[in-house]
Image: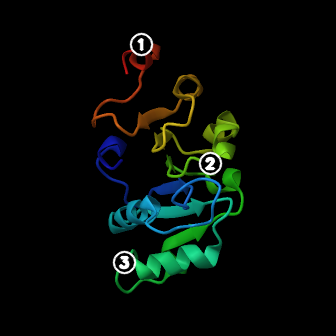
Amino acid sequence: MIKSMFNTISGKKIVILGFAFKKDTGDTRETAAVYVAKHLLAERAKVTIYDPKVEHEEIESDFKYYKALTPGKEFKDCVSIATDPYEAVKDAHAIAIMTEWDEFKGYDYKKMYDSMAKPAFIFDGRLILDHKKLLQIGFEVYAIGKPYGVKYQNMDDLKAN
């Protein structure tokens, strides 16, 4: 994520969509999202999290348990919890899909793109999104399982991957 965003995410708003370890649950045991957030915070990114089932208190508790906060920083100073995905992505530089929630497939990504900083990045960590449609909208698209440097730039890339 960092390399693809011009080698720095310092001061950039990154939105994590999905904090639960799997869809249809509020269970956060061993969630990858907390580790991703920890690394983003270490690089001084502004992290916003949206999950349809995980409560704010659970997310904050996990950050403390996994020591994901920068030493000397309070949770509220490092992480924002959103209750609406469209508000979450406003002015964001990137979206990271961390849980395969079905609702994420149905979002109006054009509306999200229009409210984001440009270039707008999307990292599909669950391979649940329509990458062709995201490209047509204007997103810089990266997907899990693809080596660094392989981003979808056109429709031919989608066929090859």
> Residue at left 48%, top 43%?
126
Q: Is residue 20 above or below residue 91?
A: below
Q: Identify whether 25 is placed above or below 134.
A: below
- Give the amino acid at mark 1: Asp
Residue 125, relative to residue 40: is it above or below?
A: above
Work out which quarter of the rendered image holds the C terminus and state it: top left
Which residue shows up at 51% across the image and 33% down it? 139
* Residue shown at 63% from the left, 67% from the top: 54
Q: Which mark is residue 101?
A: 2
Disc 3, SS: loop
Residue 64 rendering spot, x and y as whole percentages: 45, 82
Residue 137 sits in which quadrant? top right
Residue where numbered disc 3 is placed: 70
Q: Position of residue 73 (x, y in %)?
A: 42, 83
Q: Earlier in the sequence, mark 1 or mark 2?
A: 2
Q: CA distance from mark 1 to mark 2?
A: 28 Å
Left or right: where 13 falls relative to 6: right
Q: Are marks 1 and 2 in contact (CB under 8 Å)?
A: no
Labels 3, 2: front one: 2
Q: Earlier in the sequence, mark 3 or mark 1?
A: 3
Q: Which residue is mark 1?
A: 156
**What amino acid type should be assigned to the residue bearing mark 3?**
Thr
Q: Residues within 10 Å of mark 2 (few under 14, many from 20)?
A: many
Figure check: 18 above or below 62:
above
